[in-house]
Amino acid sequence: MTDSPTSLGSPDSPTRVLVLNSGSSSLKYQLLDMADASRLAVGLVERIGEADPRLVHTPRSGGKRERTGGFADHAAALAAVSEELAADGLGLDSPALAAFGHRVVHGGSRFGEPVVVDDGVEAEIERLVPLAPLHNPANLTGIRTARELRPDLPQVAVFDTAFHRTMPEYAARYAIDVATADEHLIRRYGFHGTSHAYVSRKCAALLGKDPADVNVIVLHLGNGASASAVAGGRCVDTSMGMTPLEGLVMGTRSGDIDPAVPLHLQRAAGMSVDETDELLNKRSGLTGLCGDNDMREILRRSDAGDQRARLAFDVYIHRLKKYIGAYAAVLGRVDAVAFTAGVGENAAAVREAAVAGLEPLGLSVDPERNTVRSDEPRIISQDGARVVVAVVPTDEELEIAQQTFALVGTENVRKNEIRTPLS
């Protein structure tokens, strides 16, 4: 089944972008048409190279399809994705496809914007593996697989860290020996950048203003959680640091902690570096405090009188309030606070508790507006509030697709004028 002459993304104007998010044993994908920002298909391949791998594919026309087996590696997984898309008339050999957009977690200090991947970019992403050992290798696998499949198409890397590159040096630096920090690339990079970029821009639109005229605190609250202070469309501070471990309390990550704690555990408890790493990244946060990382379950348990769940919630909210207050001080003037991601978009109790007591900062929520469920951006503070409190659903895949298409563009594709910062 092939594209019809009248379909969006015709050979004369390729407008489709395939967004890939490659994990160590998974491949998430979305095919979007940038002519109208519509989703043509979404899917997931999981347990790649493991027992019982599975592909779940859903085209825009509906009718979810599943297939299992035969996904020994990412190349096989992407080949299967290509087959599923072709069955819907959306094959990866289509001239309507303009580019692949790849999520890459760590771009270090080199990449402050999306780039078209060449051998030099690949090498630089690989050089940054020590800063993101769980993510960059998997992201590279997806890039290399796609380059082999469609070597004629631009492969664009969009970095989680890029949006935070505008942080001033005094916000990005840790107060340790400069020579040691520079030698080992130790500084604050920040993550969830595509979400913070998208949400801060959408929040400005919700206020009817240009992003350059808005100061917003973005709270990305999912299993991973981060906050950012965005002044006039530019990030000036963010809660995650050299890794995604710093900052807010998360589902399984500790967030901020005295740096002497890992040293104490290694000396007093005989824990290895790897054991300490696992503790702070996988057995801490909400899970470490109460055994659950699902905020819905924590709220249910807390309402039923479970003291461990209540403590976990209180610790979570306390840290969140500290960052809201800190970023209000950093920004000086706050126009809006935007909640996003799974918890931020759906947990009214978290939003209410996070701003409770912050009325002197101009923050409060309207109880009725706060409980409304919607997939649309919405204001949950009262009319006339000094600081708008909003819920802005994030869309990282759309942001990656938009950044990818803005870089390659139809005209640049035709003229072969795409450049990379390493070329």
Image: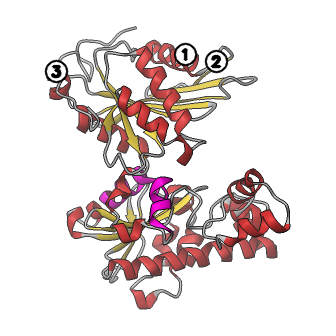
Residue under pointer 2: 71
Magenta run includes residue 383: no
Cα distance in 3D space between marks 1 and 3: 29 Å
**Residue 169's x, y, as percent?**
35, 67
Q: Are marks 2 and 1 in contact (CB under 8 Å)?
A: yes
Q: Is residue 417 above or below residue 247?
A: above
- Give the residue type that dot 3 points to: Arg
Earlier in the chain: of badge 1 and badge 3, it is 1
Indicate the quadrant where residue 133 lies. top right
Please state if 387 lies on the left or on the right of 53 as rendered: left
Q: Which mark is residue 414?
A: 3
* Element class at badge 2: loop
| Comparing labels 1 and 3, the label whose residue is closer to the camera | 3
Cα distance in 3D space between marks 2 and 1: 8 Å
Cα distance in 3D space between marks 2 and 3: 35 Å
* Element class at badge 1: helix
Residue under pointer 1: 80
Q: Start and end of the magenta stretch? A: 177-201
Pick the residue in front: 308 or 8. Answer: 308
Q: Are marks 2 and 3 in contact (CB under 8 Å)?
A: no
**Residue 305's x, y, as percent?**
81, 76
Q: Is residue 297 visible?
A: yes
- Give the residue type that dot 1 points to: Ala
Instruction: Tell me the residue at 35%/46% (across/down).
Output: 111
| Comparing labels 2 and 1, the label whose residue is closer to the camera | 2
Instruction: Tell me the residue at 57%/60% (across/down).
Output: 343
Earlier in the chain: of badge 2 and badge 1, it is 2
Label 1 CA crowd tier, 10 Å (few <14, some 14–19, many 20+): some
